[in-house]
Amino acid sequence: MNTFEILEKAKKEGYAIGAFNAANIETLKAIVQAAGKLRSPVIIEASDGEVKYIGKKQLVSLIKIYKEEYNIPIVLNLDHAPTFESCKEAIIEGFDYIHFDGSQLPNEENVEITKRVVELAHQNQIPVEGEIDHIQGSSAYHKDEDVKKEQKEELYTNPQKALEFVNETSVDTFASFIGNAHGLYSTEKKIDLNLLSKIREALPNKFLSLHGGSGIPDHDIKEAIKLGIVKINVNSELRVAFHDKLKEVINTSDEIAVYKIMPEVIDAVSAVVERKIKLFGSEGKA
Ligand code: G3H
Ligand code: ZN
């Protein structure tokens, strides 16, 4: 199955595919381990920083090997790509999905670059995700902050503008901002499900993604999937699981063989991914 077919199946059957950031190779191992165990399709997200750290060629090669090993659909996505050039390089290297994020550019420039990315990606049968409203926050643990400070309603997506953008660019997936700020906070994220249903009505033929998946209550996630979300991005919860378990293991043991330390850390991250896959309804859909 190509990425279009993987997303189409999720849309038709009413579940979402988890899109998990691979901060390093251990996190990548944790994600595919969970998806393999639960026989779920999965999207591996690699942001600019993560791509620089792991390497484009290395990511593509590892994903190819994991696809063969686990025999499940694994999509490699360039996450929040900031330039046309980074998208082009990823397409040439063999990524399966591209998310160009021009939300901080003037609208005309965002439209123009998104269009060029779509043109190139479609020649290679690769879908493109785009956005117009910058998703606030950052994928970190903002433990002393209330998420409300990142949820300014005047910055939320306007369904009419979303429709204009997808018509002008022909993007396949639209990422909206409906309160889904990036990161984990001291409070749960309340997302605007009413607005999401209006965006769905405006874009019935497009795929919809939900970024900022960490810290959104389970019942809101389930409602968002019922309203047509087919891709949910999760990063911060994985980072916290990795960090906390690594700290615990290092503080309680003198082991210096790293390969003996890491399995526990990988399992902690994998447990988070397993929980999300079950919540998103993609278990057994591989
Ligand atoms: O693109 C990545 C995500 O939207 C992750 O958001 O850190 O809130 O899970 P998160
Ligand atoms: Zn995001």
Image (tube, helix red, strand yellow):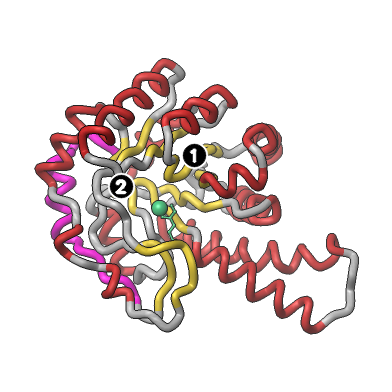
Find numbered disc 1 in the image and state the secondary structure of the residue it sits on: strand
Q: Amino acid at mark 1?
A: Leu
- Residue at image coords 40%, 70%: 215
Where residue 188 appears, as percent x and y from the top left, is: 34, 76
Q: Position of residue 277 (x, y in %)?
A: 48, 56
Q: Which residue is mark 1?
A: 78
Write down the residue under mark 2: 104
Q: Quadrant of residue 266?
A: bottom right
Q: Is residue 163 left or right of residue 25?
A: left
* 18 up-or-down from 286: above or below: below
Residue 229 visible, this orientation:
yes
Taking depth in this image into account, of 50 and 188 the one nearest to the observer is: 50
Give the Cα distance between marks 1 and 2. 17 Å
Residue nearer the viewer, 7 or 208:
208
Category of crowding for the residue at label 1, using alpha-carbon neighbours closer than 10 angstroms: few (below 14), some (14–19), many (at least 20): many
118 over 176 or under it: above or below: above
Lower position in the chain sequence, tag 1 or tag 2: 1
> How busy is the neighbourhood of tag 2: few (under 14 within 10 Å), some, or many (20 plus)?
some
Using residue 97 as the reference point, say whether residue 60 is left or right of it.
right
- Dot 2 lies on which element? loop
User: Residue at horizontal 17%, vertical 29%?
Assistant: 167
- Range of the magenta residues? 188-207
> Magenta includes 147?
no
Residue at the extreme left of the image, as rendered: 160
Q: Considering only vertical position in the picture, is 84 above or below 41?
A: above
268 on left or right of 240: right
